[in-house]
Image (cartoon, rainbow, N blue to C red):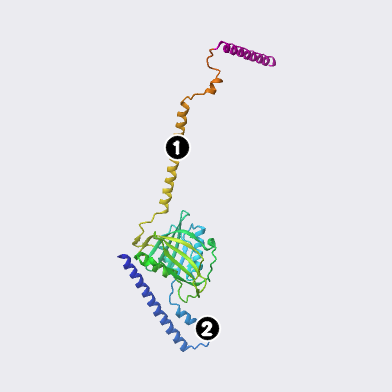
Amino acid sequence: MPMSRRFRQLEGVDELLSKKRRSASRTSESSNTSREESFPVSLKNKDASGQVKSKWTNRERVLIFCARGASYRMRHLMKDFLNLMPHSKSDNKLDKKNSLVLINEIAEIANCTKCLYFENRKHTDLYLWISNTTHGPSVKFLVHNVHTMDEMRMSGNCLKGSRPVLSFDSTFDSQPHFSLIKQLLMQTFSTPYHHPRSKPFIDHVFTFSITADGKIWFRNFQIVDEMLELQEIGPRMVLEIIRIFDGSFEGSVLYDNPNYVSPNTVRSEIKKKQSHKYVMKKLAEKAHGIKLAKQAAVKMPDPVGEVFDTERMLGNPRAKEIKRIIEKKRKKKTKSKTRENHTAG
C-alpha cells in the first residue's frame, strides 16, 4: 500500500536525521575538546553551556502562521499554540493568491521543518494544514468547535515553555492513515529535549482522541498533582480529515476521506430545506383562502337576520301601511334639510 510505504519512508527519514544530528554533535564535541586543550578556559559557565548545547540534538522547529482574512478566533487559537509550543516560530500572513508550495520556501528560510498553516474561507470555515516541509507528508483538516483559552477560562494553568506529554487514543494504531497522522502529530507538537526556550518541567498533557465518526479531538490538560489529577486548560478543537498528500502541500493523494462533506454543501442543503418550508407555507395559505371562499359561497339560514330585513316583500296590509307612513316621514325630513341648505347658501 502507498500509505504503509510512505510511513516507512517517514520513519527512515527520521532515523537519517537523528544519525546526522548525532554525528554533528560528535564533531562539535570533538572540536570543543580540541579547543579546550589548546585554549584552557577557567570559567565553569562556558563548560556548562557547551554541555547543554550538545544535549540539544532534536532541532525540530514549527512554523505557525495563517492566511490573510483571518477571523479573531483563528488569531487567538494561533496565539495559544505559539504560547504552548516553545519550539515554534511565527511569520507574516500569506496572501491567498499565492500558491501553498511557497510555504516550503518560507519554512526553509525560517529554518523550520514542520508547519501549522491556518486558512479561513468565507469568514466561517477554518482549515488547518499540518506538514513536514522537508520531505512530506501533509494533512489538510477542517476545524470544528474551536474554543480558545480566553473563551473557556478554565481553572487549569501550566508553566509557559514547559514540555507536554502527548496522549494518543489506541484507535490511531488501527488504520494506516491514522498511524501516519500520529507520527506527524508527535513530531510537530512534541517539544525537543533541552530546547533553549523550554523549561525542564512536564506539567500538561496534549490529548488526541478519535471519535466514532473518524474526527480527532484535541484537548489540553494540566497535571495538578502526583495523583495525575487533570484540569482542562484549553484550547479545544475537533479536526476532520480531508486529505493526506505525499508531499508538502502538494503531491499525490495518499488518503481521501469518503465521509467528508464540504461546508458549502451543508449550507446549500439547509437553504433548500428552508425554501421547501416557504413553498409549503404559501401553498397552505392559498388552500386556506380557497376554503374560505367556498364557505362564503354557501348561503346559510339566518333566522335573526330575517327579522331586521327591510327589503323583503310584506304580505300583511297593516305592515304595509306602517311602512308607507315611515317612508313618508323620511321624505319630509330630507326635503326640509335641502331647503335649509339652500337658504343658508
Relative to residue 281, is residue 190 depicted above or below? below
Overall secondary structure of the magenta stretch? helix
Query: What residue do we see at 49% from left, 84% from top?
Result: 47
Label 1's element? Answer: helix
- Residue 145: assigned label: none
Q: Measure how far apart labels 2 and 1 are at the Cα level.
A: 86 Å
Relative to residue 18, is residue 262 depicted above or below? above
Residue 71 lies in the magenta-colored region: no
Q: Which stretch is magenta?
A: 316-345
Q: Write down the residue under mark 2.
A: 45
Query: What residue do we see at 43% from left, 40% from top?
Result: 280
Residue 274: percent from left, percent from top: 44, 45
Can residue 136 be seen here?
Answer: no
Can residue 24 be seen here?
Answer: yes
Q: Nearer the viewer, residue 284 or 31?
A: 284
Q: Nearer the viewer, residue 88 or 308?
A: 308
| Image position of 44 (left or right of 177) | right
* Displayed quadrant of residue 25: bottom left
Q: Where's the N terminus, which quadrant?
A: bottom left
Q: Write down the residue under mark 1.
A: 284
Q: Residues within 10 Å of mark 2 (few under 14, many from 20)?
A: few
Query: What residue do we see at 55% from left, 20% from top?
Result: 307
Which callout, 2 or 1, points at the residue further toward the start of the chain?
2
Task: Kindly give the residue lying farthest to the right in the view shown.
Answer: 344
